[in-house]
Amino acid sequence: MISLAGRDILHGWGKFVFTGIGLGLLIGVTLSMAGIYRGMVDDAEVLLDNSGADLWAVQKDTLGPYAEPSNLADDLYRSLQTLPGVARAANVTYLTMQVSPLTDDPATGDPNARARRAMVVGVVPGGFGEPGQPESLVAGRHLTRGHYEAVADISTGFRLGEQLRIRRHAYRVVGLTRRAVSSGGDPMVFIPLKDAQEAQFLKDNDAIVAQRRRSAANPAFNRPGQPQVLDAVLAAQTQSNSVNAILVRLTPHAYPDQVAADIRRWKHLSVYTRAEMNEILQAKLIATSARQIFMFLVILSVVSAAIVAFIIYTLTLGKIREIAVLKLIGTRNRTIAGMILQQAIGLGVIGFIVGKTVATLWAPVFPKYVLLLPGDAARGFLIVVIICVLASLVAIRAALRVDPAEAIGG
Amino acid sequence: MNLPKPNRRALSLLAVLIPLLGAFAWLALTSGPLAPVPVTLVSVEERAIAPALFGVGTVEARYTYRIGPTIAGRVSQVEVQVGDRVKAGQRLGEMDPVDLDERLAAQDAALRRAESGVVAARAQVRDAQARRDFASAQVGRYEQLLLARTASEDTAEAKRQEAQIAEAGVALGLANLESAEQDLGRVRAERAALVRQRDTLRLVAPADGLPLGGLVVSRDAEPGSTVVAGQSVVEVVDPASLWVDVRFDQLGAGALRAGLAARIALRSQPLGALEGRVERVEPRADAITEELLAKVVFADLPDPLPRLGELAEVTVALAPRPAAPAVPNATLHRRADALGVWVLDDDGGPRFVPVTIGARDLDGWVEIRSGLTPGATVIWHSQAPLSPGRRVKVVEQLPGVAP
């Protein structure tokens, strides 16, 4: 038995393949859009993974540290460390800011050309696998000094050994990570906690000088006959003992909710478990932008489905005369329906393969993370096939209603 | 069947479809969860770890002299400028003496008067002595005349009384002289006190303890301004006593001792490291910032002198440890509360090996106490977090990392 569909495809294979490729590009766009949505969600999850924490202790009644500003005294972690169920507690600060390398861009000679918006994370250096520390590196080493070293994400474009400027200090890049990003997709730069505390609260030099003058002009601080008061006030103005959150890792058999309740009750802090933090990030922080992308994905899917249906319908209508001839020579309806169905599914399969391939190929070019999940691909494949089948049903209905007389008429 | 014609078409179709399928299959296997994770390897080295501590501090002077008046007053002159070198005991400025000079002149006059008083008292004594000598001579003469019966008993008695009066006059003169001398002593002391008081109005550099001289670091009051007692007018430091007040994180700083060699990198010269030595570790640590405090002195004072308050990075080399297996710290991972490394299994998959670690240095090497032997190969960097059963591919350099 010869395949009618195969014969027909071979008859006009160029048209068929190019239609399939065109369809594939459309499917590729849809898959990429799904990947962008997944990427946004994954950015939020990877932020939680990278922090290596089971609990987040933050300023009371805030949603910090990612969704809201939160400030804690930096010696609070000691009292958390003594609680039963807590294995480790570590201070951490987060600050999203512009980070630029000290060396000039080789192409343009402009140091600001390679400035990147990055989330600067202050972590306690030294301990391995301490909460907050980057988990695995793709190059270099972890922080060992207590000052002026940085581990940067590879997507910042900074190189090993390069110096970065954060506020007034220069930091040497000693290690590179991969997929260490904030919930907004900004790459992370890890620096020692003390430097980060300073960077977060330190004003620029002009502001400090202006503040000194302002204090000196205030008679309450600059008292005649007590010149030491002004010095003490100025010293007090430039100190910072705040951190944004305390990352808590639990002992293997501790119940997160129990420990969280203890901290809430006795330490008067807000505490979030991994699930709650995920909820905050997904439902509050990235909710609108993710929903925006999701809405667009839905519309794109509907449009793609409509276009697939139109293509198959017009392909069939283009062959209406040949179908009439087939009917005229007594071909069974099943054979004709099968031919159209097989062609539609073939088109869908080619389209899917092309779509998945191009989506995979152009995903790394996107500035933000595009996550193509195999599950999404499988779902996409199923939807493409179903749409093709549905579209071919309309085409089959049109084909079967054709009058065989058209073959000799018209 | 008429094969040739459809076959050519079929071949062209396959020529398009097969590369497409190939590309699809290749992409499915090289990206996504099925793809092997690129990793780099490193062998466990026998290595003498030289642990070191890294701290940040500021340049300070051990001896700072704030020179100012002991009583409130007005500055009349300041003779030095910031940056001047001064010698021990050098005059730096002076406070306004107000009426002290006039009081001193009055004391001078009082002194001269007291001295004249002494001279007058001495003359008085001599006068009284002359009277007494004459009177006693008269008494002797009249005694003889009385024996010769040429003078009356009455006259002789009168002469004896005159002699007694003259004797009392001598005693009075001596007492007057004593009083005048005491008065002179008092006036002298009062004048000396005024001179001392006048001296304290001079602002001078400390007389000793400045082997290289002093360096004026600030001039806090100008002539004409009023300062309170104890407020500094000029601040002088001992440049020979410059040191770095360093703060080390308490974490792992247990081996910090006085006498250890240190390298000091000033912020103004980040590349030129200076030699130094830990002078002392403060007995009191900072409880708030969780840092140990130490003082590091320069082996040779650099020229020009480091500026006071300049930031300095200090690296203290601790005693090197005997050679032991060591790995870079990027190989270490924490997994379910156990610290360990990933090694390549016989079947090429990653396997987690728990280790215990010892000393570490600032270059990121970590001593392995147990769990690994020298020469073993461990996974260094990996493109993605590893888990048992994940396929890995060994590469020289991870993709995306600039060589």
Image (cartoon, coloured by chain):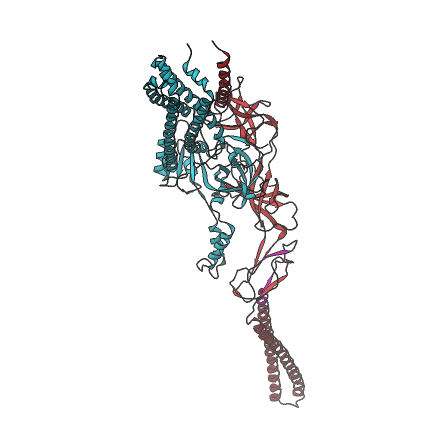
The residue closer to the viewer here, B316 or A104, is A104
- Rendered view: B370 above or below B221: above
Q: Residue at x 59, y 52 (%)?
A: B63
The x, y position of residue B18, in whole percent, is 50, 19
The x, y position of residue B111, in whole percent, is 60, 74
Quadrant in which the N terminus of chain A is drawn: top left
Q: Where on the picture, by quarter, is residue B395?
A: top right
Q: Residue at x 45, y 57 (%)?
A: A221
> Does the rendering let one see residue B103?
yes
Is residue B323 part of the magenta span, yes or no? no
Image position of A185 (left or right of B343): left
The x, y position of residue A374, in whole percent, is 43, 24
- Rendered view: A151 above or below A1: below
The residue closer to the viewer here, B61 or A288, is A288
Q: Residue at x 34, y 17 (%)?
A: A404
Q: Where on the picture, by quarter, is residue A84?
A: top left
- Rendered view: A237 above or below B120: above
Image position of B303 (left or right of A339): right
| Number of on-image labels | 0
Q: Which chain is red?
A: B
Image position of B191 (left or right of A179): right
Is residue B206 part of the magenta span, yes or no? yes
Span highlighted in magenta in the image: B195-218
> Does the rendering let one see residue A250?
no
Q: Colour of chain A?
A: cyan
The residue closer to the viewer here, B111 or A214, is A214
Quadrant in which the C terminus of chain A is drawn: top left
The x, y position of residue A138, in whole percent, is 53, 30
- Rendered view: B150 above or below B124: below
Q: Where on the picture, by quarter, is residue B314?
A: top right
